[in-house]
């Protein structure tokens, strides 16, 4: 499996501000994903982070609200912009790829976000 | 819409019993299936993957796949209180689709 470092692990933010979450992997991976998990709910895919191009967003998620960067095969960021209390959630980075990882997805420890 | 369905539970079993977790999926294009365990406040942890019809055993865990019935299950033998968690079923076509998860409670 891959070692995935995600930070910050948690944050408390004020309404209207933005937070950038970082995801660093210890090896090159093909695919990187960002998920949201609201309290008591399952995982919802926000977007697939594409290396060198714009992310692919799922229905209900837009780039202006959740801009994503992926400058190389080991690093990605997710920004939660203009936050409201409804954005309070756990945000998870996930990776998969060929070779030893195959199509299996592994998850970072997550970022627990509270918006006041 | 491609979906993966799970009973949300909670499923309560006594310590030492067999816990049976079930999952159905609608996308016949899904080729592989995964079971993740998620403890409260933690991220999902992969415990089993299965790609072919039949059973796959790993320690106390057995995954079962029936593609004709579009059904996946996870059996946990000799359940322990430490197995208490939410179990997420996921099917993979082009990407993973997660079910809502089943909360398992193993009582001493």
Image (tube, coloured by chain):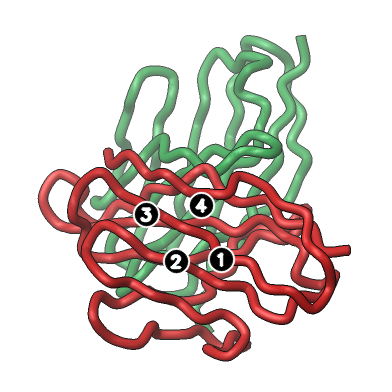
Percent coordinates x, y for residue B34 in the rendering: 40, 49
Q: Is residue B106 left or right of residue B33?
A: right
List the residue tagged with mark 4.
Answer: B89
Q: CA distance from mark 1 to mark 4?
A: 29 Å
In terms of secondary structure, where does tag 1 sit? strand
Q: CA distance from mark 2 to mark 1?
A: 6 Å
List the residue tagged with mark 1.
Answer: A20
Tell whether label 1 touches label 2 (CB within 8 Å).
yes
Percent coordinates x, y for residue B44 in the rendering: 52, 44
Name the N-terminal-most of marks 4 and 3: 3
Residue at 68% across, 12% down: B15
List the residue tagged with mark 2.
Answer: A77
Q: CA distance from mark 4 to mark 3?
A: 7 Å
Q: Which chain is green?
A: B
Q: Nearer the viewer, mark 4 or mark 2?
A: 2
Q: Which chain is red?
A: A
């Amino acid at each position: 499996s891959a070692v995935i470092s995600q930070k910050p692990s948690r944050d408390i933010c004020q309404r209207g501000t933005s937070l950038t979450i970082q995801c660093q992997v210890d090896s090159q991976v093909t695919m990187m994903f960002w998920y949201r998990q609201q309290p008591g709910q399952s995982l919802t895919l926000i977007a697939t982070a594409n290396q060198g191009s714009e992310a692919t967003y799922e229905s209900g998620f837009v780039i202006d609200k959740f801009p994503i960067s992926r400058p190389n095969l080991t690093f990605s960021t997710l920004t939660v912009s203009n936050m409201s209390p409804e954005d309070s959630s756990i945000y998870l980075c996930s990776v998969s790829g060929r070779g030893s990882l195959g199509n299996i997805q592994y998850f970072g420890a997550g970022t627990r976000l509270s918006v006041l | 819409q491609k979906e993966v369905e799970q009973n949300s539970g909670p499923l309560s079993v006594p310590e030492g019993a067999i816990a049976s977790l079930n999952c159905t999926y609608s996308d016949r294009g899904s080729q592989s299936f995964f079971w993740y365990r998620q403890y409260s406040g933690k991220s999902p942890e992969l415990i089993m993957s299965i790609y072919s019809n039949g059973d796959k055993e790993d320690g106390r865990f057995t995954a079962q796949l029936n593609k004709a019935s579009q059904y996946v299950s996870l059996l946990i033998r000799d359940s322990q209180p430490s197995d208490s968690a939410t179990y997420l079923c996921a099917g993979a076509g082009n990407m993973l689709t997660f079910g809502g998860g089943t909360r398992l409670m193993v009582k001493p």
